Image: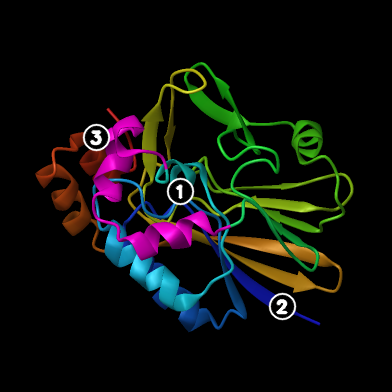
Amino acid sequence: MSMRIAAISDIHGNLDALQAVLADIARRGCDLVVNLGDMLSGPLRAAATADLLMERHFPTVRGNHDRQLLDPPDRMRPSDAMAHAQLSRAQLDWLAALPPLLRIEDVLLCHGPPDSDCTYLLEDVHAGRLRPSAPAEVARRLGGGGARLVLCGHSHTPRTVRLDDGCLVVNPGSVGLPAYRTDWPSPHRAETGTPHARYAVLQRHGHDWEAELVAVEYDFRAMARLAAARGCGDWSMALRTGRVA
């Protein structure tokens, strides 16, 4: 029996990108949409993004930024604090109730590796950038479990790897933020090089899964202007170019 899943991740409050992705998913007629976390943090439209996602009831796991939005505001990084200021108590309660992992038949949903939402599953940090991890290292991070398809986020980098046991591991990339710079665990950047909104379509054929990584055009300029108006020039550049300075 064939099944089609659309995987979205790392929306970061970019409502315009999310709406474009969901419209593209609807045109493709997917059976299920799953959400891999980091949905709201940043200077964009956190509350409206939360409203849309709460209405849709997608199977959703909590990412590291979603978890950090539950911290006291004075302990948050600035991008999380900007989102937190927009959110209602009901929206924060929705975040708090999300699980770190979900299993749907033979599909595992996670943000990073199953034991961490703030490290990478498919990448290593090397010389200030992300590079693909060896499949054996990906398998070690997963630790078994029998899934035939693992869907993860966190690195904002579209990537697929087939493990020796046939398991397909997929990062759909970021719906809403195509590049970023971070100092943890060491200074590095992630860049897709274009402003597209990203997601993945997974198709099951019998026991095996195949992935299509999708890049969706949308009017990124409005979100870039909003980021700039809120004093976040780094976000504005990332949204416009898919690169960081």
Helix, strand or loop status at disc 1: helix
Colour scheme in use: rainbow
Left/right of residue 137 with respect to residue 211 in the rendered view:
right
Mark 1 vs 3: CB contact within 8 A: no
Tell me the number on the disc at residue 202.
none
Helix, strand or loop status at disc 2: strand
In the image, residue 61 sits, relative to residue 181, either above or below, namely below
Q: CA distance from mark 1 to mark 3?
A: 21 Å
Q: Magenta residues: mostly which secondary structure?
A: helix
At label 3, the amino acid type is Asp
Q: In the image, residue 115 lies at what x, y percent?
A: 70, 39
Q: Earlier in the sequence, mark 1 or mark 3?
A: 1
* Mark 2 or mark 1, whichever is nearer to me: 1
At label 2, the amino acid type is Met
Q: Which residues are magenta?
A: 71-98
Q: Between residues 73 and 189, which one lies in front from this camera angle?
A: 73
> Which residue is tagged 1?
66
In the image, residue 206 sits, relative to residue 213, either above or below, namely below
Helix, strand or loop status at disc 3: helix
Left/right of residue 184 with respect to residue 165 in the rendered view:
left
Mark 3 vs 2: CB contact within 8 A: no
Tell me the number on the disc at residue 3.
2
Left/right of residue 42 with respect to residue 137 in the rendered view:
left
Tell me the number on the disc at residue 234.
3
Left/right of residue 203 with respect to residue 215 in the rendered view:
right
Q: Between residues 222 and 60, which one lies in front from this camera angle?
A: 60
Mark 2 vs 1: CB contact within 8 A: no
At label 1, the amino acid type is Asp
Tell me the quarter of the picture where residue 35 sits: bottom right
Badge 3 crowding class, 10 Å Cα cut-off, few under 14, some 14 to 19, many 20 or more, is some
Q: In the image, residue 238 lies at what x, y percent?
A: 29, 41
